[in-house]
Image (tube, rainbow, N blue to C red):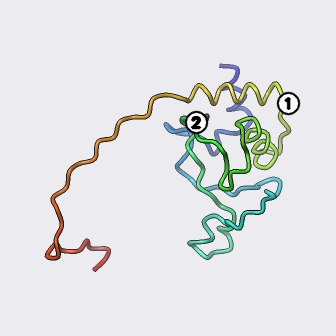
Amino acid sequence: MRRYGLFKSSGCIACHNGPNVGGASFQKMGLIEAYKTTSTAEGRFAVAKQDIDRFYFKVPTLRNVELTYPYFHDGAADTLGQAVDTMGRLQLGRKFSEAEIADVVAFLKTLTGEQPRVVLPILPPSSDATKRPQPFD
């Protein structure tokens, strides 16, 4: 509980919350301190073309996060420790100690589990005579 408590009290749950511990919102990368990258990706701005959306990226779920490296939209963090350190500074304005980074990483690893099996329905075949869906008419 100590490790989860640190994750929670540090403010990580402001973005990483809900059943999937994130994945349901867009947030600005570099909220407290600018994110320095050579990537040209500008987040939601690329689609919305609204300046307010510049550098807003989808917050990823933290389920199975230890299996999904490298981290961030540009793959800049090779390890969970690097990701925790960077997010602490850029998003929370906090410099985690090495022990705190290790505790948060240990908590994140508890989120690793089996992927749920998702069975998709078998739909009837389409043809040239199939009516197009409403959004495309």
Amino acid found under the numbered disc labelled 2? Leu
Mark toward the viewer: 1 or 2:
2
Residue at the far bottom in the pictured view = 137
Choose top left, top right, bottom left or bottom right for residue 74.
Answer: bottom right
Characterize the local packing of mark 1: few (<14), some (14-19) or many (20 or more) Cα atoms within 10 angstroms.
few
Q: Quadrant of the N terminus?
A: top right
Amino acid found under the numbered disc labelled 1? Ser
Q: Quadrant of the C terminus?
A: bottom left
Q: Which residue is disc 2 drawn over?
A: 67
- Provide residue 4's location: percent of width, then percent of height: 66, 26
Q: Secondary structure at mark 1?
A: loop
Work out whether residue 31 or residue 79 is closer to the camera in this orientation and state it: 79
Choose top left, top right, bottom left or bottom right for residue 30.
Answer: bottom right
- Provide residue 115's location: percent of width, then percent of height: 44, 34
Characterize the local packing of mark 2: few (<14), some (14-19) or many (20 or more) Cα atoms within 10 angstroms.
few
**Placement of 87 over or under 104, stated as above or below:** below
How far apart marks 1 and 2 lie (CA) works out to 24 Å
Q: Secondary structure at mark 2?
A: helix
Q: In this image, 19 relative to 108: left or right? A: left
Task: Please say if the residues under marks 1 and 2 sit with CB atoms less than 8 Å apart.
Answer: no
Q: Which residue is disc 1 drawn over?
A: 97
- Provide residue 127's location: percent of width, then percent of height: 16, 71
Choose top left, top right, bottom left or bottom right for residue 108.
Answer: top right
Q: In this image, 101 relative to 113: left or right? A: right
